[in-house]
């Protein structure tokens, strides 16, 4: 009784960081006309292209770009660096012709301090917009209203010398938090949602949703002794409030007036109840929520097994998982998982997980090429968070370097000077080169995407963990027999060790055909049996069971 999958359950979603995908006018910054010119790479309907079904665009709204677009100054327009609303409309049309849908990034928790709402709020205590943000007097004389600290460092409170009160910001001081307790703010923001849906957008990736809502009595957060920075306190009162769920339920009802719209949430891994809490009862909050446990996991079979099971169990019936290994806030997974091992081989095995696990696959631009974290000097850095913790944390800029299209001077990204330097390895790691190489990571991604899309068990089958008799081996099955019409059961096995391992599955012997190995060119459909099978170092395989 499996329901027919809806488009976004089957979708391969490609995250574009607009700054870095393709520049069309030589200013060194990616833009919408640039994205349009590269749509065929994502999906031109042939086997040569990647086969992407949707693009998630990181914010393209007008912004002072202190947080590179996550500080929005106008929710109903396009930043002039990226183009115009007309360019955006053309993107929607051109993408649709290729079967690609657009998912917008929506930042609900805060605006830029340059947003007219905040400008009005700051200009007068009696402006209606004043209450769209959080304001408070200092405690006693000079102390901040509470001890809350901000995600990107420092206090969450900044003094506004003009209106002589503190305002709240959970991220940068230039990102004042919105007060979702205010009905007019809510109504206005829901109009923003309709504005984009009316333009043909088919989904939203919702930024930092567990931050919506605060305890406005401003109690101090409890201190955690021995911890530093953001984790020095338990964030009891400045996030994870019930209001966030109320807003998600309202948003769900707003979008239900439109067809086929998906809501994807980004919540902190340590949010109360886990990210799964944002599924609500399975059909009244978000359709799907990123579970960052996989992304945060070290490259160890037992750790992966544990987090995959936890993530599977967390999704309520009616909800749907999302698989994400890299994004614009994290070090690239080829570097993260690859640490201390053969990064290239592990990246191939990770690709098998991305498309083999149950859930919508999200891939981050350049991941399919094996783009590495850029080696940046301090003077190259642009992101305030990266600068603040440099060189002690990798930060975010290294994962935001320009897309590597070819071996030319700026990797085909721009004719000008790119906003972040192109990686040194662009002469080998690029679309043009990898397209010709049957053993490249790009070829593997193309192959895996086609296989996933044509295999109902990989798309919709249940996840069943299998015992492999070897601690370094992660084995699971995606069931096909229960589907209507039935499909073969598919088995996925990944060797996390740097040496050859022998595995076997307990229980009655099963046989099948190995459809794919990360170590081979591709399909030779060799026979496979569960009684004993070997996996080479870092090898991942997909087997169709008979
Ligand atoms: C989210 C975004 C991140 C941004 C932050 C504040 O975590 O992914 O890039 O800086 O929210 O908006
Ligand atoms: Ca440009």
Image (cartoon, helix red, strand yellow):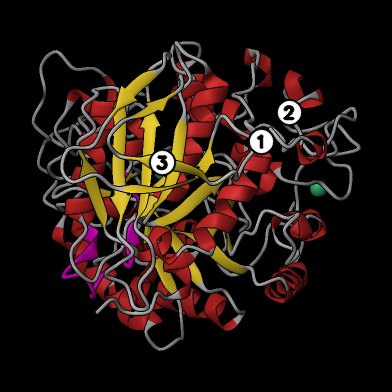
Which residue ends up furthest to the bottom in the rendered image?
Answer: 257
Of residue 370 and residue 545, the one placed in the foreground of this image is 545
Q: Which mark is residue 166?
A: none
Residue at figure coordinates x 19%, y 23% from the top left: 232
Mark 3 or 2, nearer chain start: 2
Q: Is residue 53 left or right of residue 43?
A: left
**Can see residue 112?**
no
Up-down relation of residue 471 to residue 81 (above or below): above
Where's residue 69, x and y in %?
57, 48
Of residue 410 and residue 156, the one placed in the foreground of this image is 410
Residue at figure coordinates x 54%, y 56% from the top left: 451
Mark 3 or 1, nearer chain start: 1
User: Is disc 3 surrounded by few (<14), some (14 to 19) or many (20+) residues within 10 Å?
Assistant: some
Q: Which residue is mark 1?
A: 369
Q: Which residue is mark 3?
A: 528
Where's residue 8, x and y in %?
46, 68
Where's residue 345, x and y in %?
54, 24
Q: Which residue is mark 2?
A: 429
- Whether the magenta-drawn stretch holds residue 290 is answered as yes
Q: Main secondary structure of the magenta part?
A: loop
Task: Give the magenta range.
Answer: 278-291
Is the residue under label 1 in contact with that under label 2 (CB below 8 Å)? yes
User: Residue 257, located in which quarter of the rendered image?
Assistant: bottom left
User: Is disc 2 surrounded by few (<14), some (14 to 19) or many (20+) residues within 10 Å?
Assistant: many
């Amino acid at each position: 009784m499996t329901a027919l999958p809806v488009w976004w359950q089957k979708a391969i979603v490609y995250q574009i960081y607009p700054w870095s995908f393709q520049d069309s006018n030589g200013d060194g910054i990616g833009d919408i006309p640039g994205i349009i010119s590269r749509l065929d790479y994502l999906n031109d309907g042939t086997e040569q292209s990647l086969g992407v079904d949707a693009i998630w665009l990181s914010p393209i709204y007008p912004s002072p770009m202190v947080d590179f677009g996550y500080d929005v100054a106008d929710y109903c327009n396009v930043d002039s660096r990226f183009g115009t609303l007309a360019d955006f409309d053309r993107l929607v049309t051109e993408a649709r012709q290729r079967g690609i849908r657009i998912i917008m990034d929506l930042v609900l928790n805060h605006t830029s301090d340059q947003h007219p709402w905040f400008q009005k709020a700051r200009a007068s205590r009696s402006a209606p917009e004043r209450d769209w943000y959080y304001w408070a007097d200092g405690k006693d004389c000079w102390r901040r209203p509470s001890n809350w600290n901000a995600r990107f460092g420092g206090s969450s409170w900044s003094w506004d010398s003009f209106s002589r009160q503190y305002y709240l910001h959970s991220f940068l001081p230039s990102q004042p938090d919105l007060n979702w307790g205010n009905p007019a703010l809510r109504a206005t923001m829901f109009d923003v949602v309709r504005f984009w849906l009316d333009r043909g957008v088919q989904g939203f990736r919702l930024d930092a949703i567990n931050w919506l809502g605060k305890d406005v009595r401003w109690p101090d957060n409890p201190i955690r002794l021995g911890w530093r920075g953001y984790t020095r306190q338990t964030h009891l009162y400045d996030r994870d409030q019930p209001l966030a769920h109320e807003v998600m339920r309202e948003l769900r009802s707003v979008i239900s007036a439109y067809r086929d719209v998906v809501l994807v949430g980004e919540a902190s891994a340590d949010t109360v109840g886990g990210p799964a809490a944002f599924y609500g009862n399975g059909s009244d909050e978000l359709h799907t929520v990123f579970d960052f446990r996989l992304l945060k996991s070290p490259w160890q079979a037992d750790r992966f097994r544990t987090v995959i099971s936890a993530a599977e169990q967390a999704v309520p019936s009616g909800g749907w998982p999302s698989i994400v290994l890299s994004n614009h806030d994290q070090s690239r997974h080829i570097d993260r998982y690859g640490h201390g091992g053969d990064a290239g081989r592990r990246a191939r095995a990770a690709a098998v997980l991305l498309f083999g696990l149950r859930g919508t696959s999200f891939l981050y631009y350049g991941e399919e090429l094996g783009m590495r974290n850029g080696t940046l000097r301090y003077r190259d850095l642009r992101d305030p968070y990266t600068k603040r913790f440099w060189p002690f944390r990798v930060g975010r800029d290294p994962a935001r370097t320009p897309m590597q299209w070819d071996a030319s001077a700026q990797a085909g990204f721009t004719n000008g000077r790119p906003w972040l330097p192109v990686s040194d390895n662009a002469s080998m790691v690029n679309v043009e080169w990898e397209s010709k190489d049957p053993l490249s990571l790009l070829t593997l991604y193309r192959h895996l995407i086609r296989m996933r899309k044509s295999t109902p068990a990989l798309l919709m089958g249940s996840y069943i963990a299998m015992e492999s008799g070897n601690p370094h081996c992660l084995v699971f099955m995606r069931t096909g027999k229960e589907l209507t019409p039935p499909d073969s059961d598919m088995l996925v096995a990944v060797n996390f060790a740097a040496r050859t391992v022998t595995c076997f599955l307990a229980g009655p012997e099963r046989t099948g055909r190995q459809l794919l190995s990360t170590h081979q060119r591709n399909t030779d459909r060799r026979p496979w049996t569960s009684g004993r099978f070997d996996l080479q170092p870092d090898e991942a395989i997909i087997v169709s069971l008979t």
